[in-house]
Amino acid sequence: TVLAMNLASMVSVRKCAEDIKHRGLNLDLLINNAGMWPYEKTTTDDNFETAFQVNHLSTFLLTNLLLSVLSPDARVITLSSTLHRHGTLDFDNLQFEKTPFNGDAAYRNSKLMNVVFANELQRRLSRSTKFKGITSSSLHPGIIRTGLHREDYAGRPWFKYSHAVLVALVGKSSPVHGAQTTLYAALSPDLAGRGGLYLSDCAPSEP
């Protein structure tokens, strides 16, 4: 079953969650794989900076809306990025209200939010009687050749070539290779019952 959802619309996220519930589905896995790297600042119909909403807020909303249909031992996996290490959380400037917009920083900050969200969700799940068996972790999928930077390529043509060099030197050649850590997080029996992890290269790592 494929259900459409627009992460730039809270209405769409809520509708998708309701569609899942109405179908009577129980989810063993919830993989939050949202990522956009903006070149310029735009806002959604919900009046949020687009990367902030697409990369973080909609993930937060969808996960909370679907908690009631997760299996007792479900895994919630949120894809972040190693660039979260260079992100910051300034609660007075989450949407660049006080500083000039920087798309690179917007992406890094949203990926830090993903890690913080996954860890806080695990803390709350572990203290809940109803959801205690559900686990939450985040991961870095690797540096992969995908369409993530298509806006950057259009706005900064030189970035396309520097990114290609980076992928060639330290990255993974295809989304198939990049999916391996996500599959490990979703399927490995070694991770059964273990949450609050940050994974990279198919292994737990320091965030």
Image: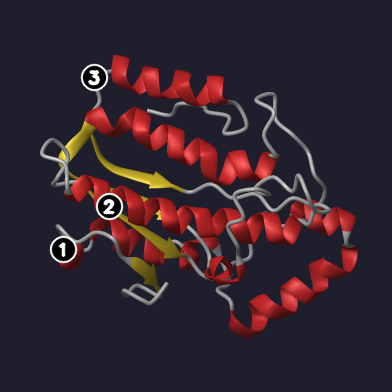
Q: Nearer the viewer, mark 3 or mark 2?
A: 2
Which residue is pictured at 58% across the width and 76% down the height? 171
Dots 3, 1 in contact, CB < 8 A:
no
Q: Amino acid at mark 3?
A: Gly
Residue nearest the viewer, comparing 159 with 131: 131
Which residue is pictured at 65% across the width and 56% down the height? 107
Q: Is residue 31 above or below residue 167?
A: above
> Is 162 positioned to the left or the right of 69 in the image?
right
- Cα separation, mark 1 vs mark 2, equals 18 Å
- Cα separation, mark 3 vs mark 1, equals 26 Å
Residue nearest the viewer, comparing 136 with 165: 136
Q: Going from the N terminus, do you reach mark 3 or mark 1 first? A: 3
Dots 1, 2 in contact, CB < 8 A:
no
Q: Is residue 42 above or below residue 9?
A: below
Q: Amino acid at mark 2?
A: Gln
Dots 3, 2 in contact, CB < 8 A:
no
**What is the secondary structure assignment of the residue under circle 1?**
helix
Residue 24 tag number: 3
Which residue is pictured at 55% across the width and 65% down the height? 84
Q: Amino acid at mark 1?
A: Pro
Q: Going from the N terminus, do you reach mark 1 or mark 2 first? A: 2
In which quadrant of the rendered image does the C terminus lie? Answer: bottom left
Residue nearest the viewer, comparing 4 with 100: 100
Q: Nearer the viewer, mark 1 or mark 2?
A: 2
